[in-house]
Image (tube, rainbow, N blue to C red):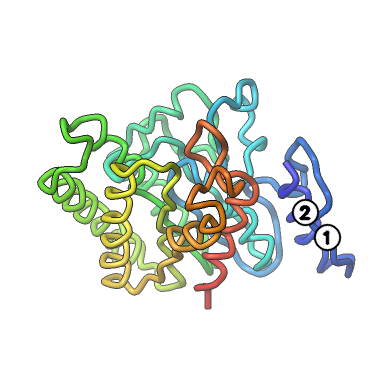
Amino acid sequence: MGIRTRWNLVALGAAVCVLVTASCSSSEAPDGLAASSLRTSGSYLALGDSLPFGSYDGAGDAYEDADNFVGYPQLVGAQLGLAVSNAACPGETTVSFRDGGCGYRDSYPLHLSYGSAGQSQLDFALEKLAELDDVELVTVQLGANDAFGCQRSTRSRCTAATDVEAFARSVQTNLDSILSALREKAGYEGQLVVVTYYVPTADDAIEQALRALAEVIDTVARAHDAAVADGYEAFREKAEATGGDPVEAGLVYPNDVHPTDAGQELIADAVLAVVN
């Protein structure tokens, strides 16, 4: 994918003093932009689901090697010169993040190996924060899979006020406990950024749930001295030119909910915009 080559070269630019244009393209993730790469000025821990992981639907054999997927954490890390530890797991919910049970791990490798098969992403994150003394940035993106679950499990497809409220309340409780653990249990006092989701399709039901999720994320993030990277608004603005359709705008893959290279770059820009 083109963005992988472009951002790898940007990351190398500081070393070779060359600025690379966006015209580069590649169908494979370059070796220099691995999910956990050695740099010189601190580290960055990325947490969450398939968006920070970088995966997309229908990838086939590419799932067998996590390095085939490059998400926005690699782009952010390259720009900031930080070593990236991407612990994200596709399909993760706020519940499985805290308690364990991300099913993707049963079939395919992640960017990083957890301590045990049953270890939750939260416990892994707490261990990583205890292990590393140079973490300058932690990003968290969770909640979209909770919204999809609400769609599947409710008769209203998560459009009834009671269903939306129950979904929002659950995510707020879970996300609050997650950020509390990162701040208080791990004692992490550095830059913490929570990322909101774009609306991937012209589906009123999922848009309603994701708008509610964005409000929850904003509320919980601020309670824990965390910045909010507004992926929701970034995609909305870009998609205006195509009638609000992020697929037509080239930000989301057709028949999928995952971001394209351009979409990943847009999320990276949203994160960079709030990093001190």
Q: Is residue 41 above or below residue 90?
A: below
Tags 1 and 2 touching, CB below 8 Å: yes
Q: Secondary structure at mark 2?
A: helix
How far is mark 1 from mark 2, CA to CA? 7 Å
In the rendered structure, which amino acid carries the disc numbered 2?
Answer: Arg
Residue 77, image x and y in percent?
A: 63, 60
**Image mark for residue 6:** 2
Q: Quadrant of the N terminus?
A: top right
Residue 117, image x and y in percent?
A: 41, 29
Check disc 1: other Cα within 10 Å, few if <14, some if 14-19, many if 20+: few
Between 238 and 184, the one nearer to me in the picture: 238
Q: Residue at x 50, y 45 (%)?
A: 51
Q: Residue at x 58, y 53 (%)?
A: 72
Residue 130 shows in this picture:
no
Q: Secondary structure at mark 1?
A: loop
**Image mark for residue 171:** none
Which residue matches tag 1? Answer: 21
In the rendered structure, which amino acid carries the disc numbered 1?
Answer: Thr
